[in-house]
Amino acid sequence: MMGSLVSVYVRFGDTHREFECCDTTFWIQATGVRADAVATAARETAASLEAQLNAFDEASAVSQLNREGEVRNEHVARLVRRGLEYNNRTDGTFDIQQGRVEHDLKAFLRGDSDTPPTEFESGTVRTSGSHVTTTVELDLNGLAKGYIVDRVSEELGGVGRRGFVSGGGDMSPPTGPVAIESPYGDDTPLKILDTDWYVATSGGYRRSRNGTDHVYDPTTESLGSRHESVTVVARRDCMEADALATTLAALPLAEARELASEWEDLEAFIVHDGVFQTTEGFDTHVLDT
């Protein structure tokens, strides 16, 4: 029945787009009614959101917030509220108040700076509707890509149509089996997922320099992922999968396993020192081969 339904969608249209967004490659697929027009609109949505949320673009709303201490923007406000929620639920491991650390860390990874950051900050962040105020520069990168995947996925859906979006390891619910990439540089996938939950993967193997990568833990003021890779599947949305994959990557193994096991509607797959570690329900999202 599912194969017949897919065939009906394809008969109306089947469109793919590939483009750069959030410093990675996005891939979208729309199948069904008005697939081509919807795929074009979804790409425009991604570009618009990136322009507002890119902290490294001086014209963005996030840059304005970090420069002036306030901004009115509904998307920034949504990310900040979710970031504050995760800060509370992870006892500070996920911390959007580290905008200066994120900026200096990315400069180091690009080779524009000779030393990684050493100082972490704290301040006061508040939201009221679309109005955000802060006394410290914010890092929303641990949420922005997942948020864009969610918004683009909404654009692709609709009556008589199916859609899928993947952005650098962050995915809307897959429309078919998807592979978990190996962090060791080989072509053999670690697992094949078959899930209707959102997916995100984090790890230092994609971006690193001199043993330092983009992951950090402000509670211990340490830099670098503690595992080769972390893949999370989450029922809520891609923003949650994105945030928790980053959080688990920063935590020691025992703490990461405990947090993932206790988090409702979330399962995790952690590669640590070459050993696969999974939460109890993760294999229900793995293709039975």
Image (tube, rainbow, N blue to C red):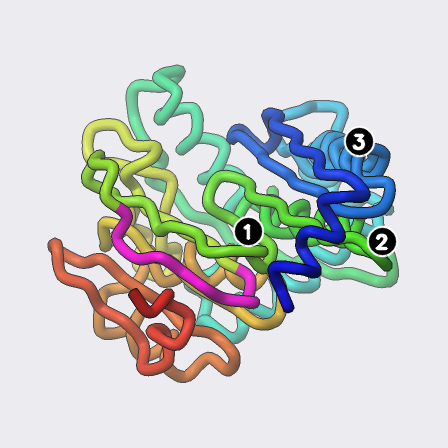
Q: Residue tagged by mark 3?
A: 40
Return the disc, 2 or 3, that comes first in the chain's sequence: 3
Residue type pointed to by label 2: His
Is residue 48 at least partly visible in the picture? no
Give residue 140's position: percent from left, percent from top: 60, 47
Most common SS among magenta residues: loop
Q: Is residue 287 magenta?
A: no
In the image, residue 180 above or below residue 214: below
Q: Picture quarter containing residue 255? A: bottom left
Give residue 17's position: percent from left, percent from top: 66, 30
Would you call the spot at circle 3 few (<14 residues within 10 Å), some (14-19), or many (20 or more)?
some
Q: In which quarter of the image is the N terminus?
A: bottom right
At 79% from the left and 53% from the top, the residue drawn is 161
Label of residue 171 in the image: 1
At 74% from the left and 58% from the top, the residue drawn is 78
Would you call the spot at circle 1 few (<14 residues within 10 Å), some (14-19), or many (20 or more)?
many
At 29% from the left and 51% from the top, the residue drawn is 229
Return the disc, 1 or 3, that comes first in the chain's sequence: 3
Q: Is residue 188 left or right of residue 144?
A: left
Would you call the spot at circle 2 few (<14 residues within 10 Å), some (14-19), or many (20 or more)?
some
Closer to the camera in the image, 250 or 4: 4
At 57% from the left and 72% from the top, the residue drawn is 235
Q: Residue tagged by mark 2?
A: 131
Closer to the camera in the image, 203 or 198: 198
Q: Nearer the viewer, mark 2 or mark 3?
A: 3
Closer to the camera in the image, 239 or 41: 41
